[in-house]
Amino acid sequence: MKTDSEIINSGFESIFSSLGMVDAERFIMLIKRDKFDYTEWQKKLWPAESVESLSGKAQKAWEQG
């Protein structure tokens, strides 16, 4: 199991590698400014998807990637 610090570092690495330095910084600022609620965001992210369908999609992506 990863530590909290390892998860934070992985998250930052992912954000910076996909967005680049400037947009990653903007993303972080937007999250902080908007009082982003991750739990509420997750509830609304895929309202029409079941756990089983999301799991199947994740498995397929894992196998391809």
Image (cartoon, grey):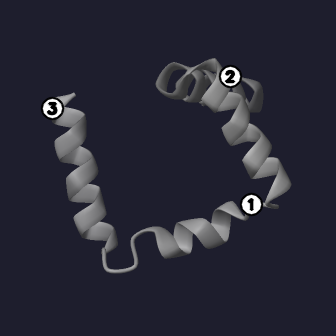
Residue type (three-letter) at the residue carrying disc 3: Gln
Label 3 Cα neighbours within 10 Å, binned few <14 / some 14-19 / many ≥20:
few
Amino acid at circle 1: Phe
In the image, residue 22 above or below residue 49: above
Name which of mark 3 and mark 2 comes first in the sequence: 2
State the image quarter where residue 23 is shown. Answer: top right
Mark toward the start of the polypeptide (3 vs 1): 1
Asked where in the image residue 25 lies, by quadrant, the reply is top right
Residue 14 is situated, as x and y percent measured from the top left of the image, at: 53, 26
Quadrant showing the C terminus: top left
Residue 20 coordinates in the image, percent (x, y):
56, 21
User: How far apart are the alpha carbons under marks 2 and 1?
Assistant: 20 Å
The image's mark for residue 36 is 1
Give me the residue at 71% from left, 36% from top. 26
Is residue 36 left or right of 33 when viewed as pictured?
Answer: left
Mark whose residue sits in front, 3 or 1: 1
Q: Nearer the viewer, residue 9 or 20?
A: 20
Check the picture and name the quadrant holding the N terminus.
top right
SS class of the residue under badge 1?
Answer: loop
Name the residue beneath numbered marker 2: 9
Q: Which mark is residue 64?
A: 3
With 27 as the anchor, is 51 left or right in this view?
Answer: left
Residue 16: x percent and y percent?
59, 22
Q: Do the residues labelled 2 and 1 touch (CB within 8 Å)?
A: no
* Along the line of sight, the residue nearer the viewer: 26 or 46: 26
